[in-house]
Amino acid sequence: MTKQRFAPTFSTQDDLAARQLDGLKWTVAHAYRGSAEYRVKLDAAGVTPDDIQTLDDLNKLPFTTADDLRQGYPFPLCSVPFEKVIRIHSSSGTTGKRKNLCYTQKDVDDWAHFFARAYEMAGVTEADRVQIAVGYGVWTAGVGFQAACEKVGAMALPVGPGNVDMQCQFLVDLQPTVLCCTASMGLLMAEEVNKRGIRDQIRLKKIIYGSERASVSMRKKISELLGNAELFDIPGLTELYGPGTGIECTDHDCIHYWADYYILEILDPQTLEPVPAGEWGEMVVTTLCKEAVPLIRYRTRDITRIIPGPCTCGSILPRHSRIKGRTDDMIKFRAVNIYPSSLDATISGIDGLGSEYQIHISRDKTERGIMRIVVERSETSDESQAEDLARELIRQVKKQLLVSIQVDVVPYGTLPRSVRKSQRVFDTRIQDEIVG
Ligand code: ZN
């Protein structure tokens, strides 16, 4: 076995806990000293850095939210002098101001190091050629994938998103073995490769996809169309450095995360109390060595769960499930809370349906909510099965999610493909905020 250059340096859970406690103490003291905003928050919560004596003291600390980042615009929660800041990244706020994040040299180095660990865990080596088809610019994606790829020593092909002709030409001419993209872009490329009849001329072995959820059937489709390519889900968010904060291992049993860089808590999003081990809740993160913008109990809004126990791959790094969705993705429909990911699972479970679908929610004349799912049938099923497939999906959704829906089954390839992320939910009900 080749030596893992980016593996964690702790060897037992006690060792990890000691490391986390040191990191937590450092982070709270650093944020308290460096940022007026953090000092105000900590003072208001009645906590001083000296109060952090054990890992359990974490729950004395106040939460940090996306609102804190917006309120501190343009350089929120910056805890170091500006001379130490070497880079800014931004994430698009869906509403209001962008979230700008500062990075020191150490932050950028740490990020490249643990992202390289993600590549290493996916089996990427110096021998690989990595086509990077994610966004470059102020976003963390492009530069994150790129810097870590170079750190591993693999060959980076920084194509960026879109530009399908160039993507295909590179796949054939430069023979990349790894493609990094969103799940939507992965599907689009897999279909394009087959449409152009170039599958025998390419050498892709691994697809590392992030920033978007992919259903079981979407993963299967991408893999099949690319000659059984192996898929790796890579999570991350700009506030927590960027992408690469963990990765699916080669046993494909959930995601290992870097507990030596951040503490992960899973909390009930309503009560903000910890959920029992193994249950779903909101991911809340506290960084252990992030300098420019340390995070103290940052509410990510991502929904996941801790997978207890060791992984079959032998890694000591703890695991969480693939991200199920965001707390703000939840659809409230006729008093039932539905995550789009539960529909992913239901659709994936029906033979004959494809992976692509849209959810349209509107109101009828009597103001009752109507949910209509437009779903593609699979490449191999035909028109004559459409009615049966629709009936089966209606039945399964009623059984599993307890709601009545309408279904249109449309031919394979009818719904739009995207080079970034696909919009799946279209909600035209009047939203409360518009009133007044
Ligand atoms: Zn594993």
Image (cartoon, grey):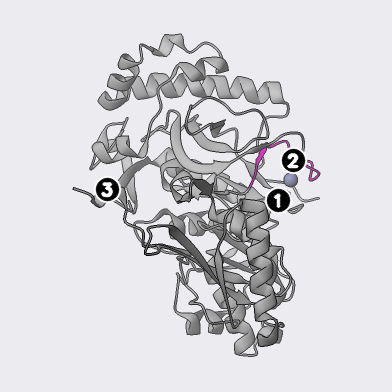
Q: Residue at x 56, y 16 (%)?
A: 56
Q: Which residue is mark 2?
A: 315
**Amino acid at dot 1:** Cys
Tag count: 3
Mark 2–mark 1 contact, CB under 8 Å? yes
Q: Position of residue 2 (x, y in %)?
A: 77, 51
Residue that numbered label 1 is attached to: 249
Say which quarter of the image contains residue 259: top right
CA distance separating discs 2 and 1: 9 Å
3 or 1: tag closer to the N-terminus = 1
In the image, the residue with mark 1 has its CB under 8 Å from the nearest atom of ligand 1: yes
- Quarter of the image for residue 8 reads top right
- Give, as a three-letter code, the residue at label 3: Glu
- Residue indicated by mark 3: 433
Q: Earlier in the sequence, mark 2 or mark 1?
A: 1
Q: Residue furthest front?
A: 366
Between marks 3 and 1 in the image, the one whose residue lies nearer the viewer: 3
- Identified by mark 2, the residue type is Ser
Q: Which residues are magenta?
A: 311-321
State whether label 2 is within 8 Å of ligand 1: yes
| Image x and y of residue 376, in percent | 59, 76
